Image (spheres, rainbow, N blue to C red):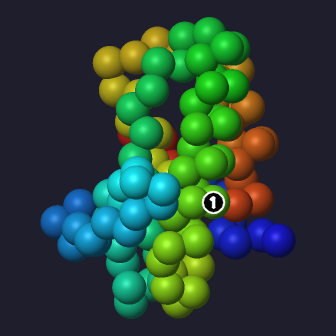
Amino acid sequence: MRVAARSHSGGGCCFEKFRSRGAATHRGRMITPEFVREKHGEFILVANHNLETEENVARSIDYNLARIINVRRHLSTALSRCRLIYDIRGHAPWSGALERIEITLADICTIEVKR
């Protein structure tokens, strides 16, 4: 099931427009999107991961996939779209990192990259 279109380049994220969302719990762990845009039916997650090796990229993908699935279980069905923002400022990602992330996660979320 495709939830959101592929990311677009150049579009910025204005964090001031979003409000923080209360956390849901799952087996004692906190599940909290960084932001929720109820008007747009969207929740936003931010990842600031070391993507310098293929191993790290695979770990990041697995972590974010699990995170998206868990968050969706606890949010209103009206929040059907997920935007995952990779903040790679100050990092030197492996050459195929962003393409691998996009290919793997594009069917369940929109990927945005902050450089």
- State the image quarter where residue 39 is shown: bottom left
Give the camera-side residue of 48 and 67: 67
As drawn, 93 above or below 77: above
- State the image quarter where residue 30 is shown: bottom left
Residue 71 image position (x, y, % from top left): 51, 64
As drawn, 22 above or below 57: below
Q: In the image, 32: left or right of 27?
A: left
Residue 57 image position (x, y, % from top left): 63, 23
Note whether residue 94 is visible: no
Q: In the image, 78: left or right of 90?
A: right
- Tally of numbered tags: 1
Q: Quadrant of the C terminus?
A: top left
- State the image quarter where residue 70 is shown: bottom right
Q: Which residue corresponds to mark 1?
A: 69
- Residue drawn at (47%, 18%), measured in percent from left and top? 50
| Residue reaching furthest to the left | 16
Q: In the image, 10: left or right of 107?
A: left
Residue 89 image position (x, y, % from top left): 34, 26
Give the secondary structure at mark 1.
helix
Mark 1 Cα-neighbour bin, 10 Å: few <14, some 14–19, many ≥20: few
- Residue drawn at (66%, 36%), measured in percent from left and top? 62
- Residue drawn at (54%, 19%), measured in percent from left and top? 51
Q: Quadrant of the N terminus?
A: bottom right
| Residue reaching furthest to the right | 1
As drawn, 93 above or below 105: above
Q: In the image, 80: left or right of 105?
A: left
Give the camera-side residue of 64 and 6: 64
Callout 1 amino acid? Ile
